[in-house]
Image: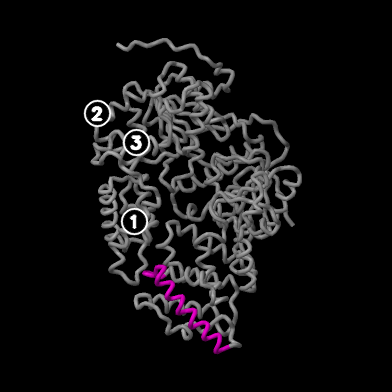
Amino acid sequence: MKYRLRPQEAARDYAAELNPEQYAAVTTTARHALVIAGAGSGKTRTLTYRVAWLLEQGVPPWRILLLTFTNKAAREMLERVEQLTGTAPGMLWGGTFHSIANRLLRRHAERLGYRPGFSIQDSDDQRALMRALVKQHHGKTAKNDRFPKAEVILSLHSLAVNTGQDWQDVLDSDYRHLSRYADTLEAIYRDYRARKQEQNAMDFDDLLTNLLRLLQEHADIRAELQERFAHVLVDEYQDTNLPQEKIIALLAGGIGSSLMVVGDDAQSIYSWRGADVRHILNFRDHYPQAEVYRITTNYRSVPAILNISNAAIALNADRIQKDLQPARESNRMLPAVIPAPDNRTEARFIAQRIDELMAGGIPGKDIAILYRAHYHSTDVQMELSRNHIPYRITSGLRFFEQAHVKDVVAFLRLLCNPGDEIAFRRIVSTFPRVGEATAGKMWASWREIAMAYLLAHPDADRILAPHSEVFAKAAVPAAVRPHWAAFLSLMDSLHPEEKELLPAELVAAVHAYLEPWMRTAYENYDEREEDLHQLARTVGEEENLESFLAQVALLSEVDQSSIAPDDDCVTLSTIHQAKGLEWKVVFLIFLGEGLFPHRRAMDSGNPTDMEEEVRLFYVALTRAQDQLYLSFPRYNGRSYDSQFCPPSRFLTSLPSDLMELWEVG
């Protein structure tokens, strides 16, 4: 017999503080609940009020488990619960999946063969261990082979863990260019696991997989935790990967356990790191009695932006039906579609329009430029810099500060200035078996030969050609000789006698030379490859190498003393990085077919890839509060390697009466 206590009288008027949709979800007595909270609908408010309501119903705080994806989200929600109820955050079990896993494993890790006080390896620790294993298994035998770097090997391993696959399957599907190293990788992964165990250490992925093992293999601990956590609440459920979904099911699998998951299938955009939208779409298949609550009142955007957002997500057939409803009044401004003649004109329009908006009183902090891939922002960054419009990038480094762009530019710098030591060292670091000491010796030899040549030939072009003759006798280790010869041959090809190559042609040639090395050096080579193709298009009209390099240096240089305050800075971000944020004005750029949606998704043949592109588009649209600008270049690039760019199917599939066409000229 179970004796139930009467609920305590609520200290708050929940019906007055929440809208009807939120109130229904917050006060539900259903054992299992799926809350579909649309963009800008108050998801965080719903979750925090749910925790407060449970506390007021007499649920002890230590029997509530709140799982989030970021420390920031957990901290904000727990602080809000404290403001509502006075319950100290430390009394609740709230935090990220990894932090909760750590707390539980601290109590029970000995059951998995760990000693008390295990350590957690951060990303630097992981790279250090993996580099040591790469050196142990590969470095002593292969002198000229470009074996994948530690970061690439770790990326493969992590993707396998987070998708619940065997690493060999991920190798075959996502890293086929590394297949020839399969035997060595198997030995490395075996030793990687063994070394962590020997060191009594776990990495971040181990926290999840070890908690899952603990729950699966030890029934007594599983039963204890199921009894402890009477209420399990999960934020951003659409972003869960397979280990996380299994952990949730086990923790909430007790006889009296209650599970509430909150999320939005329309904002599931992280499959590339293991998230599986099927977890939220198929929730009721696993919990048939679950109640479904839809929270659709949007407090963020004006009606015109919601209309186009609703129309966009309707392009997906496999989704949970809902339409966002506006709480705000109309500002009588339709989203603008801007087909620019080319990418430079698109950038000029954006810079000019932002200048007008800021002059009209809209702070830079309320303006964002969003894009599908980081390279889409290249021309915009250059144009903003030319117009002295301050900006910050939340999606990574400024374009010319990225490592792979610097790799390419280093060759051009050395071609123009053989005395550029920084460029030389960067280049030879791409050779196998060249460390700091070897690079220093090679530089000393290069510099001596170059200076002697210039002294002997005072009228010579400072671009030393042919390099293969001038530097044939440079002091280079025998193991490096083949790569040295290939490098010198490349440098000769960059400065042929018959004509001077354009900077864009130089970029393309260096990129082709570096491609095999980059595939093993960078874990996200496909994205970096697109950056370099765009770099060649961006410099298409530059005719002088020196002026191009000067422009690169000036755009890369940031004077820290002159950075504008936050209120004056425009935000540049990928859409992935922008999820959960909002701005008064949003520019969504490079909306061309093959750019967004991405060509890979269009060509994959997998409908789920295109559906995620639609969801990504929807996320971008719903970041805007007041004004929305949708632009694309009719031609991407200029005189060199210019590509025709038809408008994205996302634009052509939407009703024309939801948008206003702006012709730029």
**Main SS type for the magenta part?**
helix
Q: Secondary structure at mark 1?
A: helix
Relative horizontal placement of residue 576, taking residue 216 as reference (left or right): right
Q: Residues within 10 Å of mark 3 (few under 14, many from 20)?
A: some
Horizontal placement of 104 versus 345: left or right?
Answer: left
Question: Quick one: label 1, few (<14), some, or many (20+) residues within 10 Å?
Answer: many
Image coords of residue 63 (percent x, y): 38, 23
Mark before the other along the chain sequence, 2 or 1 = 1
Q: Amino acid at mark 2?
A: Asp
Residue 130 badge: 1
Q: Earlier in the sequence, mark 3 or mark 2?
A: 2
Q: Does the segment drawn in magenta span residue 445?
A: yes
Quarter of the image with the N terminus is top left
Dot 2 falls on a residue whose secondary structure is helix
Q: Are marks 3 and 1 in contact (CB under 8 Å)?
A: no
Q: Is residue 253 above or below residue 361?
A: above
**Front: mark 3 or 2:** 2
Mark number, residue 356? none
Residue at the right extreme, as displayed: 360
Please tell me whether mark 3 sits on a helix, a strand or a loop: helix
Inter-mark Cα distance, 3 to 2? 17 Å
Span highlighted in magenta in the image:
431-457
Question: How far across and how far down the image is residue 322, in percent?
Answer: 54, 32
Quarter assignment of residue 45: top right
Instruction: Specify the label residue 246 is tagged with.
Output: 3
| Spatial CA span between label 2 and label 1 | 36 Å
